[in-house]
Image (cartoon, coloured by chain):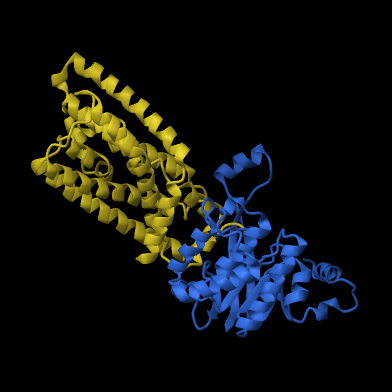
Chain colours: A yellow, B blue
Amino acid sequence: MKKYIAFFRLRFSMGLQYRTAAFAGIITQFAWASMEILMFRAFYQADADSFPMTFEATCAYVWMQQAFLALFMAWMMENEIFDSIVNGNIAYELCRPINIYNMWFSRSLANRIAKAVLRCFPILLVAAFLPAPYGLMLPASPAAFCLFLFTLLAGVGVTVAFCMLIYMVSFFTISPAGIRMVAVSVVEFFSGATIPLPFFPERLRRIFELLPFASMQNIPLRIYSGDLSGEPMRRAILIQVFWLLTLIGIGKLLDAAAMKKITVQGG
Amino acid sequence: MITLEHVCKTYRVSKRDAGFSSALKALFHKEYEYIHALDDVSFTIKDGEMVGYIGPNGAGKSSTIKILSGILTPEGGTCRVNGLIPWKNRIEHVRNIGVVFGQRSQLWWDVPVMDSFELLKEIYRIDTLSYRRNLEQLCHMLQLSDLLKMPARQLSLGQRMRCEIAASLLHSPSLLFLDEPTIGLDAVSKLAVRDFILKLNQEQKTTVILTTHDMQDIEALTSRVILIGKGQILMDGSIENIKKGYHSTEEALADFYRSHDL
């Protein structure tokens, strides 16, 4: 365990040193969030009643999403991992007494958390001081906030576990580009990154909510904004834990299979 | 103790002629060629030996090193390193070996070298006392003191290579694989690395397997040479066997390769 924590620590401290990237990210996310909120405002002005979430809740959803973007965006995968598989640098990592899956998992988790920590505070702070209904409202209750934190962590876990599947599949294909592109678009659409899942038609939404993608950002963001509570929330959390364990399980199986037939490329 | 018996490894390589029409053809029908990287390779290396493993490009050197370090599974044959089958007991096996791939880097690119070392300390669970002792010794022998605080990306090749070698030895492995450790180094760095390897072998009795194209490396370091070509062992003995009658080992070796049609 300790060695994986060491990986976490090193990747985390490494992530903290990219200050300019973080600054640029913050600006982008501000601009993006403002545009999205303005767009929703136009829709809500037309007919606020026909939307499944209140405008306030939608704004909170957008701000939280942008503040914690680094935790959930599937396209933020680690190029170094892909590179090491493609060019064979993985040889070194295989020469260590460690499990590749656990190592990459802790490493990706650290990378996402480091990025989010650097970026979230300015966004949260400014959003909190914006006038209602455009700003970030307080969570529905202290209990809801605790559940938000819990599902936030579980959600990152699901996201990382999903990305791990793609890393692992790269062991079996020569180039990871294709599968990566497909996976990223699928996640974007089905996870509620483009528009929140409640905005989808009822029957579609019911199916979407069973998929692993809904267990990423959808649950914590909606718990925070108060859109998800009571029985549906309990069900959602159960599904989330199920997917977390299942995706890790599948990843571990792929890991075992990859280790058996591995070919390190290049001389 | 390393024993390899009748080890075989075949790679499937996709192949096509250059040009657009053959690319189009390959879209529907792919042709593969099977390359026998290792074809019935056997040898034994005793503890504390220093062995040069040489051969022309594409002879199977790297494949052998990969099999010995547990990251490649051969199709046939048996291999035991200190009683363990490398690819079956990978995690247990790699605890006792150190590997330097001259063409790759194990240091984390954007952080100081020291951070990579600290990570290795945790990975190999080196206790603090022996870690400090090893680090001090390595720093002294490879002159690293000034380099440890620099990010790996800002080191020159020679400086980085010295750090790479140190990184592979922090956990005091009993067996060290060096895959072209002096590639691209200047004369001073080369001599420093050679001296160091020699001392390591003499003082710590570390078994060293060295692959290189630099004949001076071989002459300076190893008494025994295993020569491989087209996946087969062609010679196992002293480099003097080949050198007979030639002035330079380089020429002798080139002639040897030519006479064996390599």
| Residue A72 to residue A157: above or below | above
Q: Residue at x 15, y 34 (%)?
A: A227
Could you tell me residue B241's position as x and y percent? Answer: 81, 81
The quadrant where residue A224 appears: top left
Could you tell me residue A71's position as x and y percent? Answer: 33, 43
Image quarter of the C terminus of chain A: bottom right
From this viewpoint, which residue is outermost toward the left?
A: A230
Residue nearer the viewer, A213 or B13: A213
Q: Residue at x 72, y 60 (%)?
A: B185
Can the viewer see residue A3 in this picture? yes
The quadrant where residue B244 appears: bottom right
Q: Residue at x 46, y 63 (%)?
A: B119
Instruction: Say whether residue B49 is left or right of residue A143.
Output: right
Image quarter of the N terminus of chain A: bottom left
From this viewpoint, which residue is outermost toward the front?
A: B146
| Residue A176 to residue B238: above or below | above
Could you tell me residue B16's position as x and y percent? Answer: 65, 48
Could you tell me residue A197's position as x and y percent? Answer: 23, 33
Can the viewer see residue B49 in this picture? no
Instruction: Say whether residue A179 is left or right of residue B215.
Output: left
Instruction: Say whether residue B203 is left or right of residue B225.
Output: left
The quadrant where residue A229 appears: top left
Instruction: Say whether residue A170 is left or right of residue B4.
Output: left
Residue nearer the viewer, A218 or B37: A218
